[in-house]
Amino acid sequence: MQPRVLIYHAQQCDPKKCTGIRLSRMKKGKILKTMKQIPPRAVVLNPVSEIAFSKADKDDLLKSGLVALDCSWKQAEAIFANSRLGSQRALPYLLAANPINTYKPIKLSTAEAVAAALYIAGFKEQAEDTMSVFKWGPSFITLNQEPLDAYAECSTSTEIVQVQKEFMDAQTR
């Protein structure tokens, strides 16, 4: 059984560059037009959440789905602040591989966020398949292989935060 991927699309980006739209076209996610369509127990990836995404979210992921909020990073704060449905979770520290934010920490594309969550939850093949639809996609997994594997070993949000701190400290040395 694999989790259902849902994408709330805020229509703030260039449709030609939008990874959320591309995932939908490739049948790897379903676009939601309003936030009200987010299932009540779905896991919503939200970088301003105070709870880190972890394997502890796997049951809700399988029952109600994984939701990515697809919006412009310039307007993200308002979208993320207004997201209250589902179980809000933040991804741990990872580097973007997408052409717009390459090597920038945290500024993941929608597809990268989805793939990271799938990988951490134990759906490594689905994560790799998600990224396979982009020329640069496989490099996201390669670039973040070590932290993704470490996060995938964690069982709880608290463990994820501890491991994340180690990676962030190593980046500043």
Image (spheres, rainbow, N blue to C red):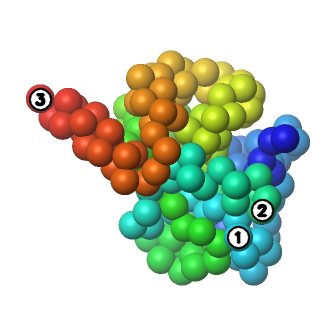
Which of these two is toward me, 75 or 41?
41
Which of discs 2 and 3 lies nearer the camera? The answer is 2
Q: In this orientation, does residue 72 appear? A: no
Residue type indicated by callout 2: Ser
Residue 128, numbered circle: none
User: Which is in the foreground here, disc 3 or disc 1?
Assistant: 1
**Which mark is on residue 41?**
1
Q: Which quarter shows the C terminus?
A: top left
Given the image, on which type of amino acid does mark 3 rest?
Arg
Q: Residue at x 65, y 72 (%)?
A: 86
Mark 2 or mark 3: whose residue is earlier in sequence: 2
Q: Is residue 135 above or below residue 159?
A: above
Amino acid on which disc 1 is placed: Arg
Circle 2 SS class: helix
Q: Is residue 62 left or right of residue 98?
A: right
Nearer the N terminus, badge 1 or badge 2?
A: 1
Residue matched to label 3: 173
Local secondary structure at mark 3: loop
* Nearest the eye: 73 or 34: 34
Q: Indicate which disc residue 64 carries.
A: 2
Residues at badges 1 and 2 in contact (C-beta under 8 Å)?
A: yes
Mark 1 secondary-structure assignment: loop
